[in-house]
Image (cartoon, rainbow, N blue to C red):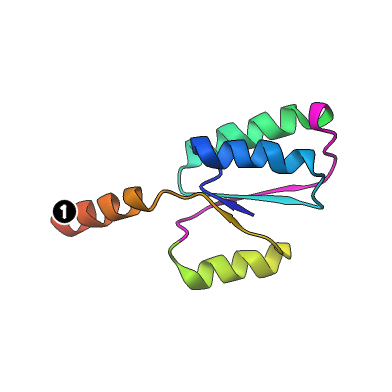
Amino acid sequence: MVSGAGGSIGSELCRQILRLGPARLVLFEISEVALYNIEREITTGREAHGFDRGVGCVARECHHKQRVREVMQAYGVQTVYHAAAYNMYHRRAEHRRRHS
């Protein structure tokens, strides 16, 4: 599973992980647009990567521990590559506090 899968670092991790032939790749991303873009890149480039297994897409924030656990259990995740940008989380949290 790659958190922040749609960002610059996360998407590159996804590309490199695909070369290793994982049983499944789970994309965890807060931005639906970024998630769509990396999922589309992966699914259209499956043959180039030799990846014929499933891709799981999850549009959620990674700071909710219980939700992350549920996703990991549901997909049988064994390895997590954490590339989500925490600086964005703090900015969003501050924005919520100011506009609540």
User: For this view, does 74 lie left or right of residue 5?
Assistant: right
| Disc 1 secondary structure class | loop
Q: Using the rendered view, name the quadrant where residue 100 is placed.
A: bottom left
Question: Image point 41% across, 48% down: which residue?
Answer: 85
Residue at figure coordinates x 71%, y 62% from the top left:
75
Q: Does 64 sit above or below residue 93?
A: below
Q: Which residue is mark 1?
A: 99
* Image x and y of residue 61, in percent: 45, 56
42 up-or-down from 60: above or below? above
Q: Position of residue 57 (x, y in %)?
A: 62, 48
Left or right of 43? Residue 11 is left
Closer-to-camera residue (26/15): 15
Badge 1 amino acid: His
Q: Is residue 6 visible?
A: no
Question: Which residue range is magenta in the image?
Answer: 48-62
x and y percentages locating residue 38 in the rendered image: 60, 35
Query: Which residue lies at the image location 51% right of the left edge and 73% below the top edge?
Result: 66
Give the quadrant of the N terminus. bottom right
